Every structure is written in C-alpha cells, then in structure tokens.
Image (spheres, rainbow, N blue to C red):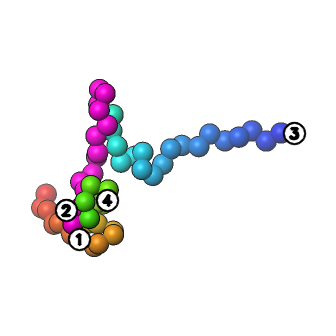
Amino acid sequence: MAKEAAKKKSKGRWSLYQVSGNKLERKNNSCPKCGQGTFMAKHANRWYCGQCRYVEMFSK
C-alpha cells in the first residue's frame, strides 16, 4: 500500500499577508527600529518585536 501524501496547510509568513485586488497587504505592523523586513507580534495590550524587543503599548 502506498501512503497518501497529506495536504500541507500553508503556515508562517503567508498568514501575515492579505490579498486585496491586485495588491498584497501586510496584516501586522513592521518594526520602526528594524525596518520593513521585520513584523511585530500583536498581543492583547501591545505590539512586540521579537528581534530587537521593541514594545508599543496600546489601550483597548
């Protein structure tokens, strides 16, 4: 019996983008210190950069 290849769901970087029309838009902010290549993680009360540890707090 041959094993069937399981379909892989795309994860990682593709979940950080959204397609609208012919444009590809970022869902998360980019880090002001690191530049456009680094995304910031969105938490309940802050934006956090894992590379340089920059934090932006926000209130709900």
Residue indicated by mark 4: 38
Residue indicated by mark 3: 1
Secondary structure at badge 4 equals strand
Packing grade of label 1 (10 A; few <14, some 14-19, many >=20) is some
Whichever of labels 1 and 4 marks the residue nearer the N terminus, that label is 4
Image marks 3 and 2: residues in contact by CB distance under 8 Å: no
Q: Amino acid at mark 1?
A: Tyr
Task: Write the residue at 28% across / 46% down.
Answer: 27
* Quarter of the rendering containing residue 46: bottom left
Disc 3 versus disc 2: nearer the observer: 2
Q: Is residue 34 above or below residue 9?
A: below
Residue indicated by mark 1: 54
Residue 43 appears in the figure: no
Secondary structure at badge 2 equals loop
Q: Is residue 27 above or below residue 57?
A: above
Q: CA distance from mark 3 to mark 1?
A: 52 Å
Task: Write the residue at 28% across / 73% down.
Answer: 53
Q: CA distance from mark 2 to mark 4?
A: 9 Å
Residue indicated by mark 2: 32
Q: Residue furthest bottom?
A: 53
Q: CA distance from mark 1 to mark 4?
A: 11 Å
Region in magenta: 20-33
Whichever of labels 3 and 2 marks the residue nearer the N terminus, that label is 3
Image marks 2 and 1: residues in contact by CB distance under 8 Å: yes
Q: CA distance from mark 3 to mark 2?
A: 54 Å
Disc 4 versus disc 3: nearer the observer: 4
Task: Write the residue at 27% across / 55% down.
Answer: 36
Secondary structure at badge 3 equals loop
Image marks 4 and 3: residues in contact by CB distance under 8 Å: no
Q: Amino acid at mark 2?
A: Pro
23 in magenta:
yes
